[in-house]
Every structure is written in C-alpha cells, then in structure tokens.
Amino acid sequence: MHYMNEPTIEARSEQPYVGITAKVSGHIGEAPELAAEVLAWLSARNESPAGLPFIRFWCLDEDKDRLIEVGIPTKKLLPEDQRIISGYLPGGDFAHAIHKGPPEHFWSSADGLADWLAREGLSAALRYEGETKIWDGHMAFFVTDPVEKKTRDAWVIELFILLLADHAA
C-alpha cells in the first residue's frame, strides 16, 4: 500500500532544537517516549516547543542499528546536559513528502522519498565516515502527536531530506 504523497522541494530555515541521541533497530517505536522525555526537560526549564517533535536520522545502515536523534525545535539554542543535546537543524532546500498511514509503514515512505530523489536526478546532502553513510539533513516531523496518539492507524509524518546546495545548477 502507498502511504506517501507526491514529493516537492521546500526551503527551510536553520532551526535550534534539543534532543536525545539513540540507536534503534529499524523501527521508530521508541520515539514517543524519547519525545515525551525531551518535552518534560523543556517544561522543567520553563521553555516551550517551537515546532513539532521530530526524528533526525544520522545513519540508516540496514545492517546495523540506526543512529537517530529525537528532538523538539526551540526558540533559541539551549544549554545541553548529560542526556539532552542541543544544536541546529540545517537550513536549505529539502525534498519534502508526507506519510499518511501506520507508523510501521513509515520506512516505505522514507525509502520512497529517497527513490524520488534518484528519479529526479537530485542528490541528498550526505557524507561518509569510513564506509558509513551520514545524512546531513534527513528528518521526520510528527504532525500526529506520538505521545498522545495511542492507536497505530493513520499517523501523519512529514519527511524531509536536505539537498546538496548546488541542486538547481
């Protein structure tokens, strides 16, 4: 079944955020609990979110655990602690699509967006550390609140992949 709309190109500005780094085995099931932990951390500091919870995918190696960050956009850069990291989501032009369906089918939509890039002759901003592919801006924003939504039916998740800066050349 197809859960992704037709992708588009969208410009996004750099965005400060706080989050938690995690390794997952291929499912995004831990994300709601980690998002709730980040939201509680913000609340304890009297800070409010400046956007939707997200997952930033750093390494999506199929043979190993996937390195991700689960984060919340903020209005300003905040200090880190032992568990919470702080940084900026990159700005630039992104391939953008929307996944509408069960979260367990999210990866088929993420793969579909990467396939669309290849068909369109576009390149994702990524680099290699040894033989490991590192994504500079591959993110999924939860329009459906993963903390509140208890059913596993029609979630809405916005997908973004940062394009190389010279994609329009």
Image (cartoon, rainbow, N blue to C red):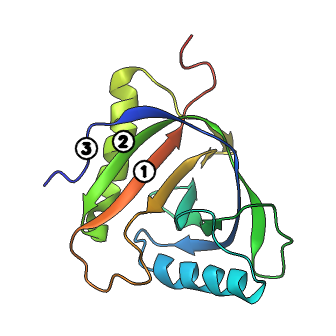
Q: Is residue 77 left or right of residue 132?
A: right
Does residue 61 appear anywhere in the picture? no
- Which residue was labeled with disc 1? 159
Label at residue 12: none
- Which residue was labeled with disc 3? 5
Q: Using a 10 Å C-alpha cutoff, classify the residue at mark 1 as few (fewer than 14 neighbours), some (14 to 19) or many (20 or more).
A: many
Q: Is residue 103 left or right of residue 19?
A: left
Q: Using a 10 Å C-alpha cutoff, classify the residue at mark 3 as few (fewer than 14 neighbours), some (14 to 19) or many (20 or more).
A: some
Is there a contact, CB below 8 Å, between mark 3 and mark 1? no
Does residue 57 appear anywhere in the picture? yes
Label 3: state its secondary structure.
loop
Mark positioned earlier in the residue sequence (2 or 3): 3
Residue placed at 73% from the left, 77% from the top?
47
Label 2: state its secondary structure.
helix
Label at residue 113: 2
Where 139 falls versus 153 (above or below)? Answer: above
Query: Which residue appears farthest toward the left when viewing the image?
Result: 1
Is there a contact, CB below 8 Å, between mark 2 and mark 1? yes
Residue placed at 59% from the left, 46% from the top?
137
Q: Is residue 118 left or right of residue 43?
A: left
Where 105 falls versus 42 (above or below)? Answer: above
Q: Nearer the viewer, mark 2 or mark 3?
A: 3
Mark positioned earlier in the residue sequence (3 or 1): 3
Q: Quadrant of residue 108?
A: bottom left
Under mark 2, the amino acid is Leu
Label 1: state its secondary structure.
strand
Q: Using a 10 Å C-alpha cutoff, classify the residue at mark 2 as few (fewer than 14 neighbours), some (14 to 19) or many (20 or more).
A: many
Under mark 3, the amino acid is Asn
Mark positioned earlier in the residue sequence (2 or 1): 2
